Image: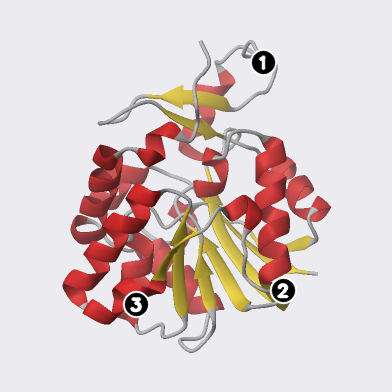
Amino acid sequence: MHRDPKAHWREPKTALMYARTATQIGLWESERIMVRRYFALTDDLLEVGCGGGRAGLGMLKLGYTGLQLTDFSEAMVSITRGVLADINPTWAGLVAQQDATALTYSDASFDGVIYAFNGLMCLPDRDARLAALRSIHRVLRPRGILIFTAPDREKGKNAAHWKNQSLPVDGIPGNRWHETETSPVFMHSSTEQETYAELELCGFTTLTSPLSTEVAMDSKAARDFAGETRFYVVRKV
């Protein structure tokens, strides 16, 4: 039976679940460290795949003044506007509906892009990931920075699970559907070398790629929600 990888993100119940993480979990400590390390408070920044506004709200609270939030899902955009407006009514205007694989912003519009909590790896296949990376590359300024995360199937806490998995029917290692509170969600788990290769194809060079546990000890709520993931900090060539 065919499953639509986008369906989960269009559901109002999913949007509500992610909105709760914005207020109950917020920006992870590892995320806070990474964004503060690579982005100035006055940079022009774009978040793609903003979900319920968790990372974006956290960055706005840190004082980032040039941030715009986007998601392809109308449900996510609507609920994120509400989450932000509860804190500051003017922040609702920072949210727009955009598809990460086909951003409509002008070339070289942003100093940096954030694709938080494995969003890139929720895209349905490699072609979609490459399309998103090329779209992000286009809207970044020269030497602009992209920060994203991806679950690692070779190292860290998830390695044991993937080591014991047989090759799936589609022949692509790392593809997996798993259950959530609302509906099944698609996720691709990669290796560093696979992700490096995709980034290089799209015109990025990797600056660093630590596991989240190597950056900071995130709160128990964040660990329970997100587990361990790998940060990629990359620069537009």
Dot 3 crowding, Cα within 10 Å, few <14, some 14–19, many 20+: some
* Rendered image quadrant of residue 90: bottom left
Which residue appears at 64% of the width and 33% of the height? 125
According to the picture, the residue beneath numbered tag 3 turns out to be 60
Which of the marked residues, 2 or 3, is nearer the chain's N terminus? 3
According to the picture, the residue beneath numbered tag 2 turns out to be 107
Q: Is residue 133 left or right of residue 153?
A: right
Disc 2 + disc 1, Cβ < 8 Å: no
According to the picture, the residue beneath numbered tag 1 turns out to be 170
Which residue appears at 17% of the width and 70% of the height? 86
In-front residue for pair 145/74: 74
Q: Residue furthest bottom?
A: 42
Q: Position of residue 213 (x, y in %)?
A: 44, 52
Real-space CA distance between mark 1 and mark 3, rounded to the nearest whole angstrom:
41 Å
Residue 192 visible in rendering: no
Q: In the rendered structure, which amino acid carries the disc numbered 3?
A: Leu
Real-space CA distance between mark 2 and mark 3, rounded to the nearest whole angstrom:
24 Å
Disc 2 + disc 3, Cβ < 8 Å: no
Dot 2 crowding, Cα within 10 Å, few <14, some 14–19, many 20+: some
Which residue appears at 35% of the width and 84% of the height? 63
Residue 125: give its label.
Answer: none
Q: Is residue 23 left or right of residue 111?
A: left
Q: Position of residue 109 (x, y in %)?
A: 64, 78
| Closer mark to the observer between disc 2 and disc 1 | 2
